[in-house]
């Protein structure tokens, strides 16, 4: 499940490039890539792992494929939600895809934004869970709590032969209740990972939330497929009620005749839901400080500093989070890092782009970085992947100057096609039809200088587009 916007990890995580696609743990891979690799590690002599199903946002479809290509992983399908409807409809889409062709596989359902420090222990626990689920049970992965955490849901379970039986799901408790759970024992954190047969999920959903099941089926019937992309019917999916897996099904199972079990997971799990969680898993110095990037710390303790684009110096801070990006800086008390989402809500309410886009914006063909702007001008650094091209387009309100920094550019400029090398340039007059392409085998980088009365991204008329945006 690779949807979600990760608002509590703003300003690094934004709707256009959310936390699951970020490298946050010192690893060489994003959280999504790490999750994909963990799934592949489940294969064993008596366990076959099929290519994965990814459920994600339409806006992130090329991010998903690009990041999977980087780790040489090929998904069976990428199921694209036209709008967010929470995790119950997402899992339903995956179950319907898995049931195609008469199969009824066991689904290992995991969010794409968690981290695990002991992959071997993770694989061992998941294999146990798969064997229990193969017999028809729903299995929840439970994390043994090591502190009275108020940000997680809890599971109360009763030991039984094979796997503990889930007696109750408990919502995020207050501190006093969490402390009591820790003292009593018998409670684990709800990891948000589930293992169950596809048919078992559909049966339970149709029993407890037939409205979600019926609406999602209708969207599935109206689906369209394009290579590995599967798109449910947009109008039909808009009618699907938004609900989580927990609320829709899991919390209703205890006390019913549905067999629901808990398998413990002791593998250094963390859901990285907020900056405090990132601090917890990060390497620290002798004073408990964690830092990423160009950072100088003086007389500080238990503090996280994440610098993206420049030097950040901090003096005399305790239990603080500082996150710097090219267009925003966030400073918070570490114990209140859950409240960062309120900043994002304020940005959204004020219709500011910082809640959704970075200064550097990723596109299917590469990226652009808005390095300077002012009245009637904007300067962008643009990278185009080998073999990729932008749309054939024109602008009503701006002209553009392109300077090749590295690589080779193929430029369509009206009725002319030019090939430009390093240090060469061209001018695109206002109203001229044009296209930028990279015919080479290395990334193309250019500097684009825009000038005109209006420079917004919506001043683009697309005539042809490889990515279906015309």
Image (spheres, grey):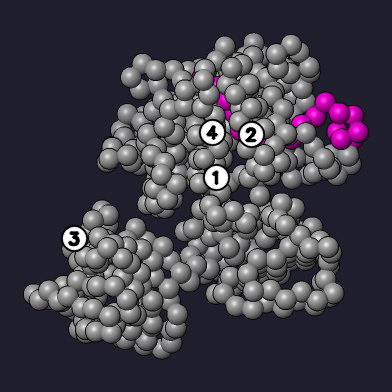
* Neighbourhood count class around disc 1 (C-alpha, 10 Å): few under 14, some 14–19, many 20 upward: many
Q: CA distance from mark 2 to mark 1?
A: 13 Å
Residue shown at the point (69%, 37%) measured from the top left:
267
Judging depth in this view, the residue of 271 and 406 nearest the camera is: 406
Q: Which mark is residue 57?
A: none
* Residue that badge 1 annotates: 34
Residue 422 locus on image (x, y percent): 27, 80
Find out whether residue 261 is within the magenta segment.
no
**Quadrant the C terminus occupies:** bottom left
Location of residue 97 by image quarter: top left
Tell me the magenta residue range: 180-198
Taking the spot 38% from the left edge, 78% from the top edge, the residue there is 380
Pair 2/1: label in front:
2
Query: Do callouts 3 and 1 mark residues in contact (Cβ within 8 Å)?
Result: no
Badge 4 local density, few (<14 within 10 Å), some, or many (20+)? some
Q: Position of residue 320 (x, y in %)?
A: 77, 66
> Do we see residue 243 in this rendering?
no
Using a 10 Å C-alpha cutoff, classify the residue at mark 3 as few (fewer than 14 neighbours), some (14 to 19) or many (20 or more): some
Find disc 4 in the rendering and name its residue. 41
| Residue at the spot of label 2 | 120
Q: Earlier in the sequence, mark 4 or mark 3?
A: 4
Residue 204 versus residue 314 in the image, above or below = above
């Amino acid at each position: 499940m690779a949807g979600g916007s990760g608002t509590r990890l703003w300003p690094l995580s934004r709707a256009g490039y959310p936390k699951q696609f970020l490298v946050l743990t010192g690893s060489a891979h994003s959280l999504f890539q790490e999750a994909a690799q963990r799934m592949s590690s489940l294969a064993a002599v008596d366990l076959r792992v099929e290519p994965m199903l990814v459920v994600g946002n339409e806006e992130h479809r090329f991010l998903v494929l690009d990041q999977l290509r980087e780790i040489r992983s090929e998904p069976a399908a990428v199921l694209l939600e036209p709008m967010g409807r929470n995790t119950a409809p997402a899992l339903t889409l995956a179950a319907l895809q898995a049931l195609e062709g008469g199969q009824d596989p066991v689904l290992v359902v995991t969010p794409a934004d968690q981290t695990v420090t002991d992959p071997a222990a993770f694989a061992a626990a998941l294999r146990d869970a798969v064997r229990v689920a193969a017999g028809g049970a729903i299995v929840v992965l439970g994390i043994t709590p090591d502190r009275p955490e108020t940000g997680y849901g809890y599971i109360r379970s009763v030991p039984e032969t094979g796997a503990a039986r889930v007696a109750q799901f408990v919502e995020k408790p207050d501190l006093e209740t969490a402390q009591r759970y820790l003292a009593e024992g018998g409670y684990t954190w709800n990891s948000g990972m589930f293992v169950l047969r596809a048919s078992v999920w559909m049966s339970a959903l149709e029993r407890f939330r037939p409205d979600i099941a019926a609406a999602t089926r209708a969207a599935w019937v109206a689906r369209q497929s394009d290579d590995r992309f599967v798109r449910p019917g947009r109008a039909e999916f808009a009618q699907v009620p938004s609900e989580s897996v927990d609320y829709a099904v899991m919390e209703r199972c205890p006390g019913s005749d549905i067999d629901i079990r808990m398998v413990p997971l002791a593998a250094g799990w963390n859901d990285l839901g907020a900056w405090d969680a990132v601090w917890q898993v990060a390497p620290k110095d002798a004073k408990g400080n964690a830092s990423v990037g160009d950072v100088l710390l003086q007389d500080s303790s238990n503090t996280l500093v994440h610098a993206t684009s420049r030097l950040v110096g901090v003096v005399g801070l305790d239990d603080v989070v500082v996150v710097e990006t090219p267009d925003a800086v966030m400073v918070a008390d570490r114990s209140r890092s859950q409240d960062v989402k309120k900043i994002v809500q304020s940005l959204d309410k004020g219709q500011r782009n910082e809640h959704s886009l970075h200064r550097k914006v990723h596109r299917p063909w590469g990226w652009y970085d808005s390095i300077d702007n002012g009245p009637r001008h904007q300067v962008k650094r643009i990278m185009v992947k080998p073999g990729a091209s932008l749309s054939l387009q024109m602008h009503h309100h701006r002209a553009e100057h392109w300077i090749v920094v590295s690589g080779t550019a193929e430029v369509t400029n009206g009725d002319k096609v030019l090939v430009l090398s390093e240090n060469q340039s061209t001018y695109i007059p206002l109203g001229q039809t044009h296209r930028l392409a990279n015919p080479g085998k290395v990334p193309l980088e250019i500097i684009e200088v825009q000038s005109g009365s209006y420079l917004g991204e919506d001043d683009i008329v697309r005539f042809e587009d490889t990515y279906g945006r015309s």
